[in-house]
Image: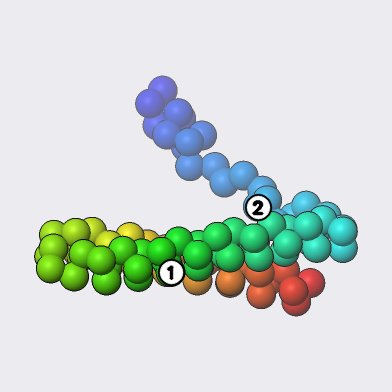
Amino acid sequence: SVSGAAKKETRVSKPVSMKKTTPKSIERNMQKLEQEISALEERAAALDSDAQENASDYVRLMEIEKEKEEISAQIEEKLSKWEELSEM
């Protein structure tokens, strides 16, 4: 029946966080996050430079600002994950 199929789709799988993590894997994940954060920060700095070069191009400035906001959100997300790992 259709209702039976719908019920199967709503089942929730076990959270991934249930996995046993070793100190070594936590350290590797933290290092990876640090590298990713650094790369994002470098990209944000390059965008700042790009914004200065395109100060008279409103459309380009808006594109740059949008990308910087996305990068900032990614950095915040990765920092949050890093902090979670550091507390394990």
Query: What secondary structure is found at the residue carrying circle 1?
Result: helix
Of the two numbered discs 2 and 1 in the rendering, the one whose residue sits closer to the viewer: 1
**Mark sitting earlier along the chain (2/1):** 2
Total number of numbered discs in the rendering: 2
Front residue of 21 and 83: 83
Q: Residue at x 64, y 60 (%)?
A: 35
Q: Residue at x 74, y 74 (%)?
A: 86
In the depicted structure, whether residue 15 falls above or below residue 38: above
Q: Residue furthest front?
A: 53
Disc 2 versus disc 1: distance between alpha carbons? 36 Å
Q: Residue furthest top?
A: 1
Q: Tell me the quadrant of the picture where the C terminus can be found.
A: bottom right
Q: Is residue 23 left or right of residue 26?
A: right
Residue 72, percent from left and from top: 42, 69
Q: Residue at x 18, y 70 (%)?
A: 55
Query: What secondary structure is found at the residue carrying circle 2?
Result: loop
Residue 83, percent from left and from top: 66, 75
Q: Residue at x 59, y 59 (%)?
A: 36
Residue 53, percent from left and from top: 25, 66
Within the image, what quadrant is residue 11 found in?
top right
User: Mark 2: which amino acid?
Assistant: Pro
Front residue of 62 and 27: 62
Q: Which residue is mark 2?
A: 15
Mark 1: few/some/many CA within 10 Å (<14, 14-19, 20+) = few
Q: Which residue is mark 1?
A: 45
Mark 2: few/some/many CA within 10 Å (<14, 14-19, 20+) = few
